[in-house]
Image (spheres, rainbow, N blue to C red):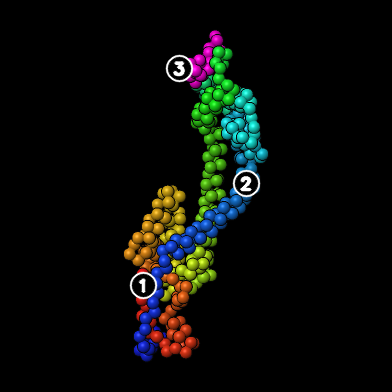
Amino acid sequence: MDETLVKTSKKVHLNYTSAKFHRRAFANLTDFIIFVLLFGALFLATRAIVMATPSYKTTAGTYLSMRIESGLYMPKDDDCQDTVAYLNDAANNYSGYAKKNLAKEGIEKFFLFTEKYGTESVSKEIHEDYDAYRLRDGFSYKSVAYFIQNGDVIEENPACEATFKEWFDYVYAPYINEHLHGYLIARFPQYLELTKYETQMLLWAEITPAYLLAGILTYLVPPLFFRRGRMTLGKAMYRIGLADRRLLCCPFPRFLGRFAIWYFAELCLAPFTWGLPYIISFSLMAFSKKRQGFPDYMLGLYEVDVTKDKLYFSYAEIALDDTAQGKEPVDFRPTYID
């Protein structure tokens, strides 16, 4: 068909212009918003599925009970919250007196926790650290030490005039945050394993599947329906089509290759490289000679304005389209205008 077309038709040019940069940017932003919304919905769905499994329920229950038993977390609804953050939450409306006493109570609970779950050496290490923390040089309020040693007992200095809130803010809260949380992770293997389990489930069973599936639904599925131009929803809104070097509609194998390059070289690597692949691709799109992103540059593809012009699947389709409109078949000589 193409050979006959070349021999019998007059020569004309079909011109395409590259899509304006700002339109491409807005189209990409639209797709990104769709991606984020899908990711959020899929994450909630995968999290609900994971949390409904018996193994997760059992492990999560053990993890929750250990955290509360440690004294470093307080119950909140069906979960828990860091003790210091919980006491500082304005919604809970704790007085300075209550904050100080509840923080001290949390520290005492942690010592009981060490005796139950830790070794004798670990318990001794933590007690000695608490003693050293309270009696360290310069630990005072207006030059009056917070603590004094009375025989074998270390107690609050009655001469110290710090308010209850100051005791909480400068004595007990820092010790919980800067010392005990570190001990909880570093000295209790059972708790560490539970923390790893929670983290791994969150990362690999909840976030990663939602992230990857959102990428497929946003950037692969719509172009399967918007075949003429292989457009995502954002590109369809701004009438931006994808053409190959011949300025024909991007064929499916090449589109699939483009998606694979974007998916594995950009989407999958971006979270581990502070978004560097996105920055590189966007820079190429903004400043390269032909304004091509990285996948388009690799495969010789172009994003063209199809507001008024139509992308064709083949030369034969052009001839049929012109014949149907009563025009003489044309010899296709594509021209890309940047």
How many angstroms separate mark 3 from mark 2 (CA)? 48 Å
- Residue 98 in magenta stretch: no
Nearest to N terminus: mark 1 or mark 3: 3
Q: With respect to residue 320, does 336 lie above or below?
A: above
Residue at point 45% right, 85% down?
Answer: 322
Q: Secondary structure at mark 3?
A: loop
Q: What range of the chain is rendered magenta?
A: 132-153
How many angstroms separate mark 1 from mark 2 (CA)? 54 Å
The quarter of the rendered structure image containing the C terminus is bottom left
Q: With respect to residue 106, does 304 lie above or below?
A: below
Task: Indicate the amino acid at tag 2.
Answer: Met
- Pick whichever, 159 or 119, lies toward us: 159
Task: Indicate the amino acid at tag 3.
Answer: Asp
Viewer-side label of 3, 2: 3
Horizontal relation, residue 65 to residue 141: left or right = right
Residue at point 56% right, 17% down?
Answer: 161
Q: Which residue is mark 3?
A: 137
Q: Which residue is mark 2?
A: 51
